[in-house]
Amino acid sequence: MKYKIFVDGQEGTTGLKIHEYLSKNPNLEVYKIESEKRKDLEARRTLINEADIVFLCLPDSASRESVSMISNNKTKVIDASTAFRTHQEWTYGLPELHKNQRNSIQNSFRVSVPGCHATGFILAIHPLVAEGIIPRDYPTTCYALTGYSGGGKDLISKYQNSNREHLFAPRQYALNLNHKHLPEMQLHSGLSTAPLFTPIVGNYYQGDAVTIPLLPRLFTKRVTARDIHELLATYYKDERFIRVMPYDSKAYLEDGFFNLMSCNNTNYLDIFVFGHDNQIILVTRFDNLGKGASGAAIQNMNIMLGFDEVSGLE
């Protein structure tokens, strides 16, 4: 038996990458919609209701529209938009979040794929909040440096088809401090307030690094950077896609510089701990198109269908 799969939004950056992953699995029958019918409601409705799993790679409003078209009790949905990431009736698609999350994903008909920056932030911070080291009201700050592919086709075209000098320098954005990932970053990390978050886009295609500075003097418990590393290493010791790198990993730097592209074209996420008794920096490194988007979507599909979790991802 082959499972029927439909990607609604198949021609976007995330949709194309999902199709690439799907092509590796012989147990799937992948439906495609003709390009001229991409916005045809009835054509989409038919495919959505015929599929066992639908991936939604659409803007928020279009994702909500697609979900509203489902008229059966069998079609499962994996949504890559922001629309349902904090919705109580949807399962947050981050299997490594805690020990019961995989079971929730496996038994869910509605799964939301985490945002790229949110993935890096939550996986670093949630264990520290859960263990009572960071208080829920800790004044968290973070910044992320990411490739321009995270901005979709329009931003990709702007970078690849322009020689404007200012595009060669990293550019901060979302300076109204209202980035769309903030609600999920707060909710799923366990914090009572959202972090102060600054994303930065660089002149390269893919790769994301989320950096979180921490001040131990504000912790609930007295711990060192090495203690934080040991806690994270223990928390993720059985995870196939989360790698907690050796403490204070200077050996993984290149002439003292951090390479944020080392997880590109994989579904891995690396966690680094740097610092000393008074100051700590956590850095998570991953592919914004992999663990930050399409790879995470496929990982969730594998769990929902009972496949090996790494199927098509290695």
Image (cartoon, rainbow, N blue to C red):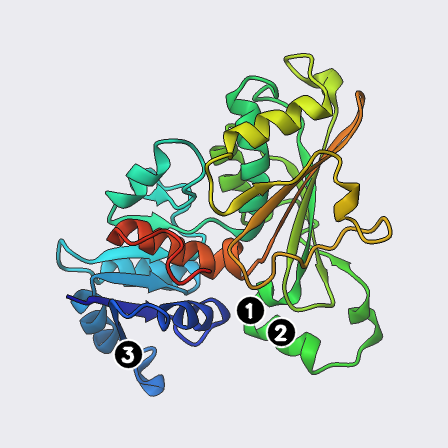
Q: Most extreme residue toward the right, as rendered?
A: 255
SS category of the residue bearing label 1: helix
Q: Residue at x 47, y 40 (%)?
A: 239
Instruction: First in sequence, mark 1 or 3: give its number.
Output: 3
Report the amino acid beneath label 3.
Asp
Horizontal relation, residue 54 to residue 251: left or right: left
User: Mark 1, mark 3: which one is toward the viewer?
Assistant: 1
In the rendered structure, the answer to whether residue 239 lies left or right of residue 210 reads left
Nearest to viewer (mark 3 / mark 2):
2
| Mark 1–mark 2 distance (CA, rounded to whole Å) | 6 Å
> Measuring 74% from the left and 55% from the top, which residue is drawn there?
259
How many badges with numbers are in the image? 3
The residue under label 2 is which amino acid type?
A: Ile
The amino acid type found where label 1 is placed reads Gly
The residue wearing badge 2 is 156
Looking at the image, is mark 3 or mark 2 earlier in the sequence?
3
Residue 27's x, y, as percent? 25, 67
Q: Where's the N terminus, which quadrant? A: bottom left
Task: Rate crowding at label 3 as few (under 14), some (14 to 19) or many (20 or more) other CA atoms within 10 Å.
Answer: few
- Residue 81: which numbered mark, if any? none
Taking the spot 71% from the left edge, 18% from the top edge, the residue there is: 218
State the separation of the CA atoms marked 3 and 2. Answer: 26 Å
In the foreground, 270 or 50: 270
Residue under label 3:
40
Q: Secondary structure at mark 2?
A: helix
Labels 1 & 2 near each other (Cβ < 8 A):
yes
Name the quadrant containing residue 171: bottom right
Q: Residue 152, labelled with which disc?
A: 1
Q: Picture coordinates of residue 81 (x, y %)?
A: 43, 57
State if disc 2 and disc 3 touch (CB < 8 Å): no
Of the pair 251 and 206, the residue shown nearer to us: 251
Q: Is residue 309 visible?
A: yes
